Amino acid sequence: MDFDQVRLHLNAYKENDQVIDAAKYLLYSFDLEHENFAGFGLRKAIPNLFLLITEGELGEPQKVMIPPNLFDFDLNLVLNVIAHEMLHVRQKSSINTVEDKNEREFQAYYEMLFHKVFPKIPNASDFHKKIFADKAFEYYRRMGENSELQQKYAAQKKEIEQLISILL
């Protein structure tokens, strides 16, 4: 992937206040599209912070809400966060629905670290990887001590622990 070309396109969209078109461009460019995706919508911007939210009932098409200042942030981080939300779009489809929120979030943070579903997504900084890992561990804990879900994701948890030990 030619990131200079991607940045050029994003800057053109940004100059024309086409945030939603820029986000759609990233979906196409990084193979993030899914049939359960209902589109992007705009949500209120928060200075120095960006938050994306996937909206929609389980089994129904999902809309991803993005702030107008989304592309003021590091592109690798933005791509990882969009991939996180697009994984939620897949998880909430009527096919292979992941009903448990803790499981959905653990899977999404794991994806932000290892890019197994979306291999074109670049790595985030080590600083952000540590944050993603902490969030994954938080949702893993919420699954319940020695629960069936924790057992299901024990190998992935170990992968995250190994990655973090390298980053420290």
Image (cartoon, grey):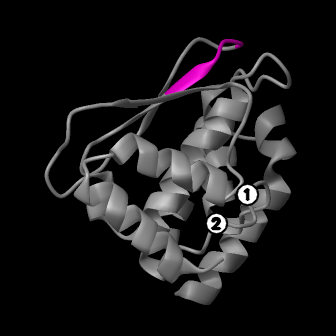
Residue at the disc numbered 2:
121
Kindly identify which numbered label has been placed on residue 81.
none
Q: Is residue 62 magenta?
A: yes
Report the side of 168 relative to 18 (left or right). Answer: right
Q: Is residue 99 visible?
A: yes
Residue placed most toward the observer, 38 or 128? 38
Inspect the image, locate mark 1, and give the three-letter code of the amino acid beneath it.
Phe
Q: Are circles 2 and 1 on residues that touch, CB within 8 Å?
A: yes
Residue placed most toward the observer, 45 or 41? 41
Q: Which quarter of the figure has residue 111?
A: bottom right
User: Which residue is at a point 56% across and 63% down the rendered structure image?
Assistant: 133
The span picked out in magenta is 59-63
Q: Is residue 144 visible?
A: no
User: Which residue is at a point 37% across and 70% down the rendered structure image?
Assistant: 74
Report the side of 19 relative to 133 (left or right). Answer: left
Q: Which quarter of the figure has residue 7?
A: bottom left
Inspect the image, locate mark 2, and give the three-letter code of the amino acid beneath it.
Ile
Kindly identify which numbered label has been placed on residue 118.
1
Label 2 secondary element: loop
Label 1 secondary element: loop
- Total marks shown come to 2
